[in-house]
Image (cartoon, helix red, strand yellow):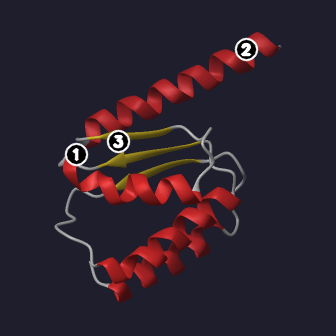
Amino acid sequence: MSKEEVKHAAERVREALRDAAPGIRVLTDFRWLESMRPSAAPHIAEIMDALAEKQVASVIRIIPDPGKDVGMNILSQFHYSHELPISTVETLVDALDRLLEQNAGRDRKELEAQ
């Protein structure tokens, strides 16, 4: 991905988050990402900062090649809270399973609190 593509994506994320409530869960899909230019990193960081400001509940990344997760992990250390649950999975099915598990856990906690 080029710097301009990621910059445009950052703008779209900010727009989408404008009316979002805190505590949303984030699913990012990198299945078709072949490579990303280093000049795009500041815009990835900008997206992470926008998500952190919205106090996201979790981040699930779909990255079929675990070796491509290194840059995201490094950026996450600087732009997300260390308490934020971040998962990396290889398939969309795995990501949806993880999301269902997280939602089930949240629902259990809400029921126990009642």
Picture quadrant of residue 104? top right
Residue 36 versus residue 56: which sits nearer the camera? Answer: 36
Q: Which mark, by number, is residue 88?
A: 3
Query: Mark 2 or 3 closer to N-term?
Result: 3
Q: Is residue 5 left or right of residue 104?
A: left
According to the picture, the residue beneath numbered tag 1 turns out to be 66
Tell me: residue 65, above or below residue 40.
above
Residue 47 versus residue 45: which sits nearer the camera? Answer: 45
Tell me: residue 84, above or below residue 48.
above
Instruction: Give percent across and percent down for residue 42.
Output: 47, 77
Q: For the view shown, which residue lies furthest in the right direction?
A: 114
Residue 105 versus residue 39: which sits nearer the camera? Answer: 39
Question: Do residues under tags 1 and 3 come within 8 Å of each other at their CB atoms?
Answer: yes
Query: Mark 1 or 3 closer to N-term?
Result: 1
Q: For the view shown, which residue lies furthest in the bottom direction?
A: 4
Q: Is residue 7 left or right of residue 37?
A: right
According to the picture, the residue beneath numbered tag 2 turns out to be 111
User: Disc 2 vs disc 3: which is toward the camera?
Assistant: 3
Q: Amino acid at mark 1?
A: Pro
Residues at marks 2 and 1, CA–CA distance in whole angstroms:
36 Å
Q: Residue shown at 50%/76% (left/top)?
A: 10
Tell me: residue 45, above or below residue 5.
above
Q: Residue shown at 29%/84% (left/top)?
A: 2
Q: Amino acid at mark 3?
A: Thr
Q: Is residue 56 left or right of residue 66?
A: right
Q: Residue shown at 64%/15% (left/top)?
A: 108
Q: Residue shown at 60%/42% (left/top)?
A: 82
Q: Is residue 111 left or right of residue 44?
A: right
SS of the residue at dot 1? Answer: helix
Query: Mark 2 or 1 closer to N-term?
Result: 1
Residues at marks 2 and 3, CA–CA distance in whole angstroms:
28 Å
